[in-house]
Image: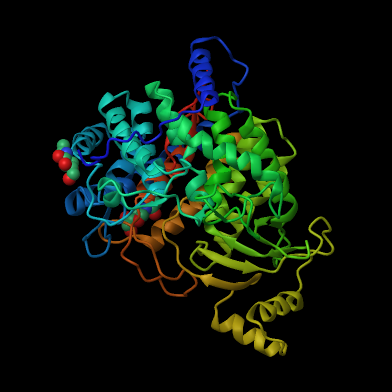
Amino acid sequence: MLFARKRGPLAFISGAAVLLLLTYLYLRQSDDEAAVWNPPGPQQSPDARARSRERQQAVKDTFSKCWHSYKEHAWGADELAPVTGGRRDHFGGWAATLVDSLDTLWIMDMKAEFEDAVAAAEAINFTHTELREINVFETNIRYLGGFLSAFDLSGDVRLLRKAVEVGDTLYKAFDTPNHMPITRWDIHAAARGEKQVAPNNVLIAEIGSLSMEFTHLSMLTGDAKWFDAVQRITDEMAAQQDSTALPGLWPLAANAEESIFNSGSFFTLGAMADSTYEYLPKMAAMTGGLLPGYQTMYEKAIDTATKHNFFRPLTPTNEDILISGEVHAKDDGSIELEPHGQHLTCFLGGLMALGARLFNRENDMDAARKLVDGCVWTYKALPHGIMPETFYMAPCQEPNDDGACKWSDEAWKEEVLRRAGKDASAADADAIIDADRLPKGFTAIPDRRYILRPEAIESVFMLYRVTGREDLLESAWDMFVAINRTTSTELANSAVHDVTTKEKPEAADSMESFWTGETLKYFYLVFSDPGLISLDEFVFNTEAHPFRRLVR
Ligand SMILES: *[C@@H]1O[C@H](CO)[C@@H](O)[C@H](O)[C@H]1NC(C)=O
Ligand SMILES: *[C@@H]1O[C@H](CO)[C@@H](O)[C@H](O)[C@H]1NC(C)=O
């Protein structure tokens, strides 16, 4: 036993939470069909289907190459180093790539490889790590999410046992006076029985996105303790959602020690916040609408974000697109938009398409489409056809006025200078644009990497499944070809340092587990029959692990 301490982690389980869970488990047995969601689903011509099948095979070939290299060079490690063939352990050393890819193997019908991987996964010891500290959020979405989804798909009970093992380890991070979790958690101190207190500064994404996995684990085991642990966080967030400086959104950081979620002035749906918002409608989808609070929270958040965070950028071709930016709430009560785009935020268009269908918010489809088109446009605007991690663009002042959003070289250059903090002549602007390799419309590119992230294809996939728009398949294919061309190594695929260079970007020798867990899964599914992982039956966690929904 690693955890020698005898004190029960959560001595007190809230009655309301148990009641909800039991209601839910009861309803699971009933014929309640009220929450069934039926997207129209894409209908393809035979020609289009044949083309999709070829593309699907190309994606599988890329996955298969990565998987076999991982197996040969880094089996059991968190990651393969895709250039040098080395091993990397950043996520507990519990074979992150292996666990994160289990459901991908199943979905791609690589059953022999799946069997190998399950057998290897059985031997992982989730109470032991060489790392000083574990990231509860990452462990939750990658490992717990990976096992739950692989169990949902295969029914192999060994996977549910591993999920419980991960869940039991993570549960101990909630053993604090107010039962808020320690998000960057010293597992060794916990094992020594040291007193634990939740930190006073945690990222909202890391504390707000444990709900799907923990609730799903309770759903599958019938044990309410996990659901109860995360429902406490949700209750606090719901109670404080209207009293933040930008009501509807939560500030980037929370004080977990004192359960404060409404103090702070910076609001984003991007890095360090993203999946908290993502899980609101997805919790509603997963639990078949049994927890209506999630819909309310989602609607408040999206209404605020639509009003304050989204902006239409100036583009040379006057595209009617949106980017989700960031907001500073000032002391004088005013709101300032930071026109900062991120690859991570690209999940949002797809999510809003899902939310629109789920909650009959057809008005959201317009913004959903424009956000997805914004990501597609940004990919195409860069020389290798890939969006950088982060960028700035010039927001157009009156997004609904086509005249005011008309491209102007001067307006763009003015914004480049403003962003660079200079009040000089247009000649300086040209020099900056040249030196920083800024495509037209971009005013700065602070982070030029592409690290094999999934969010853009994720949203293209979601919007395609919801609308059946055929042009999205072409966008998906262009993205795949561009990414594959730019990131391929002899062994696998690698993150790259700079997608703005003229020459082929230099490889960073890194392949995070989300490449095979998420990115290639979404590429595969967008070219698959919509019956494969139907959105009527499944909802994806933030690591692209499909969980079975509570619907018939
Ligand atoms: C897992 O690791 C812990 C801590 O090092 C150890 O006590 C335990 O025996 C291990 N379990 C297995 C099954 O190896
Ligand atoms: C992906 O890249 C690999 C390695 O360069 C190449 O063999 C393969 O043909 C590429 N696939 C597509 C569809 O371009």
| Picture quadrant where residue 235 is located | top right
Q: Observer-nearest residue: 368 or 420? A: 420
Q: Observer-nearest residue: 101 or 222? A: 222
Q: Observer-nearest residue: 387 or 381? A: 387
Name the residue: 57% across, 54% down. Answer: 345
Q: Is residue 497 above or below residue 291?
A: below
Image coordinates of residue 110 in percent, x first then y, are 28, 35
Image coordinates of residue 301 in percent, x first then y, are 67, 45
Q: Is residue 60 above or below residue 340?
A: above
Way the structure is coloured: rainbow
Image coordinates of residue 389 in percent, x first then y, are 50, 63
From the viewer's perspective, is 320 left or right of 160? right
Q: Is residue 537 above or below residue 369?
A: above
In which of the image's four quarters is ligand 1 placed? top left
Number of numbered discs on residues:
0
Does residue 262 appear in this view? yes
Name the residue: 35% across, 48% down. Answer: 195
Does residue 58 appear in this view? no
From the viewer's perspective, is 287 left or right of 95? right
| Picture quadrant where residue 366 is located | top right
Q: Is residue 339 above or below residue 246?
A: below
Name the residue: 39% across, 38% down. Answer: 145
Name the residue: 31% across, 49% down. Answer: 194
From the viewer's perspective, is 184 left or right of 206? left
Image coordinates of residue 522 in percent, x first then y, are 45, 43
| Quadrant in which the N terminus is drawn | top left
